[in-house]
Image (cartoon, rainbow, N blue to C red):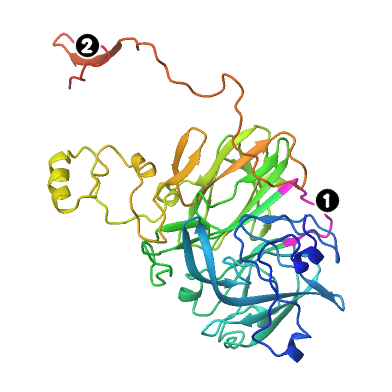
Amino acid sequence: MVSRRDFLKGASLAGVAATAATVSKVAMAALPEIVSVSDAETQAPLMPDNGRPYNPVVTLNGWTLPWRMRNGVKEFHLVAEPVVRELAPGMKAHLWGYNGQSPGPTIEVVEGDRVRIYVTNRLPEHTSMHWHGQRLPNGMDGVTGLTQPGIKPGKTFAYEFVAQRAGTFMYHPHADEMTQMAMGMMGFWVTHPKNPATMAVDRDFVFLINAYDIDPGAYTPRINTMLDFNLWTFNSRVFPGISPMVVNQGDRVRIRVGNLSMTNHPIHIHGHEFMVTGTDGGWVPPTARWPEVTTDIAVGQMRALEFKADAPGDWAFHCHKSHHTMNAMGHDVPTMLGVDQRDLKQQLQGLLPDYMAMGQHGMANMAEMQMPLPDNTLPMMSGQGQFGGVEMGGMFTTVKIRKGIAKHDYRDPGHYQHPAGTVAWEVENDLPPVERPADTDAEGGVEVQVRKPGDHMQH
């Protein structure tokens, strides 16, 4: 649990800093302090110590932005700036974001709050801020040229409105979007209901889906890419860098997912079924909810998924597009399944001693091979579980359900200790003969072939 006072003092978070380089000391005295976090680990929920009470969320590999109360207005300060984001250990990206990270910090308010957000621009070009899904005055909507002039480098704009309805929203620029959103400029916004008992859950996680195209060995995304992204992320992190979602067995869990990538994502959980209880349009009435184990989230949409964590274990949670659970894929790699590469390998190793034949028997060995990679590049599949390589990357993490997890404890409990007899096992005895239909004779009968283990199938 992190209070605003602890946050500003830096007692509980590494890398918290306050700076005011873009505005004068006189002007800065009127603005909320700038809080910046560079650490990519999931931070504890920020418990409100002023204003209306609410049940805080936990931002996966992120944090919540502190505020100050001034004359009854809840004030925040966002800084648009270049940032360095660790996508996973071994790879960093040079992005644009807010307050030291991409995505920026989550903003949490309560329905009915009057909110004032200062946005300071430290980018090399103008920007703006759009409050995706909010009901607000037209002049606060943040569309450059249409509802406001752009925020020039070094300048600060203020946005003020009342958070009119509870729900889950996002923020991002409406200025040079192809560049700024491709560089990671986005963040999450949660407006909590006035009554904390409304839609209350035990654990409430949030994260954004986004994607990048970063060449192996490079640090900066290719901003002109429209489809062929090679890094699909939860909150600008890829597996094994994405934190697990840790919950106590029996908890009611909500996971809010917003999609600001360039394609849809079928988000899937193992071992449980969930209800879709919310969209960016608000809560779904109980009579209109539906059960799923996979729900598709289109571009610009948000979905709130709720389930009871009643089955202990380390359960996979991921996008079900298989290419989205890999890192740094090459789009021009040929399929080599079944191709005998022995002669080719010998010939090429005469010219390239380190050449390795890949793909003849599938790509699973990519997770095991210690291939030399360019600097600042992740293997396509990585991450270790207690039984070996997980063979995943990208949009993949786990929901770790255990008995005895304290209310505000989000620490990784380690590998799940399976009860005896509950892990799939290898069958070591000989398999029985296999019978299958082979050919139909002239009389219409069926000739049956018996195949023993080791025999080749006859076609």
**If you read the primary sequence from the N terminus, does the residue marked by circle 2 or circle 1 appear first?**
1
Which residue corresponds to the image point at 62% horizontal and 23% vertical from the top-left?
419
Q: Is residue 111 visible?
A: no
How far apart are the two marked residues, 2 and 1, measured between alpha carbons?
A: 66 Å
Q: In the image, which residues are magenta? A: 191-203
Q: Is residue 46 above or below residue 155?
A: above
Residue 241 drawn at (x, y percent): 53, 52
| Disc 2: CA contacts within 10 A as few (<14), some (14-19) or many (>=20) | some
Q: Is residue 71 visible?
A: yes
The amino acid sitting under disc 2 is Gln
Locate residue 310: give its quadrant.
top right
192 in magenta: yes
The amino acid sitting under disc 1 is Ala
Which residue corresponds to the image point at 72% horizontal and 42% vertical from the top-left?
252
Residue holding disc 2: 449
Which residue corresponds to the image point at 86% horizontal and 75% vertical from the top-left?
72
